[in-house]
Image (tube, rainbow, N blue to C red):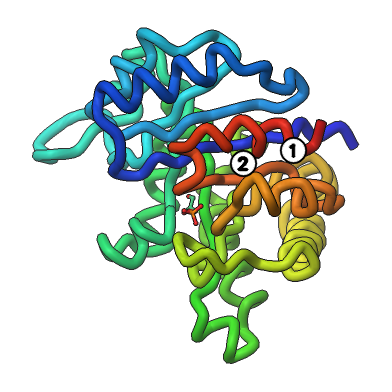
Amino acid sequence: MGRKFVVGGNWKMNGDKNQIFEIISNLKEASLDSNVEVVLGIPAIYLAYVKSIVPDNIGIAAQNCWKAEKGAFTGEISPAMIKDIGVDWVILGHSERRTIFGETDELIAAKVDHALESGLKVIACIGETLEERESGITDQVVFKQTKALIPAIGNNWNNVVLAYEPVWAIGTGKTATPKQAQEIHATLRKWLSTNVSEDVANSIRIQYGGSVTASNARELGACPDIDGFLVGGASLKPEFVDIVNATK
Ligand SMILES: O=C(CO)COP(=O)(O)O
């Protein structure tokens, strides 16, 4: 179906200029699989710095943005500002934004809407908590989170990547098994074919995120409905190169 594998590195609130210089130098020297799209999610304050040193084959993303172009929103940054410094992507709806900062499906949808309208590409994150998985409602949760995005995305699905990140697997060292991840990715794709279109279901890239490392990336990446990863902790380490190259 020709979905290009896409590996995101979500640095979260980590890194300083020295460490960033080192990470980027390491990526510059590495031979990255050219069949894989690489996008680094950078803390806002370092976006311009990374933009100035990153090679062309690596995309960069903000980790959040506000739902308006400008105005009295102290502390926020807008998609227009992100675009203005030459950055093409934003990560929205990450579970840390949802749980720590109280972002609702509705707010996330408004952000996705405005980011896409502004010409940014979006990595939109969804995923269930441990309680939800144990109650057997994983599918409903993921459907509900995705459903909220449908009107916001409109005809812009080609500028969206979905990241399925089970909350219980984030930063815990507990990875979803390839079978668990494949199952939900396939279920979500089927749901998209019914609720959006077959075309979108076939073309949308669905990343898996949650304790992805160099040692589990190959097996996860071989699953037919896993089209990439969103990597947290390991994206700050040299092993990120091996994760990018895992499907080579
Ligand atoms: O939240 C994540 C990526 O967005 C995953 O984080 P970890 O890879 O550290 O589990």
Q: In the image, 145: left or right of 31?
A: left
Q: How many marks?
A: 2
- Residue 183 falls in which quadrant of the image? bottom right
- In percent of width and height, residue 91 lies at 45, 41
Residue 220 against residue 27 in the figure, above or below:
below
Quadrant of the image for the N terminus?
Answer: top right
The residue carrying mark 2 is 161
- In percent of width and height, residue 158 lies at 67, 33
Which residue ends up furthest to the right in the rendered image?
Answer: 1
Q: Residue at x 64, y 88 (%)?
A: 136
Q: Residues within 10 Å of mark 2 (few under 14, many from 20)?
A: many
Residue 14 against residue 136 in the figure, above or below:
above
Q: Which mark is residue 246?
A: 1
* 137 or 178: nearer the viewer: 178
- In percent of width and height, residue 66 lies at 28, 40
* 118 or 44: nearer the viewer: 44
What SS does tag 2 mark?
strand
The type of residue carrying mark 1 is: Ala
Residue 111 against residue 78 in the figure, above or below:
below
What SS does tag 1 mark?
helix
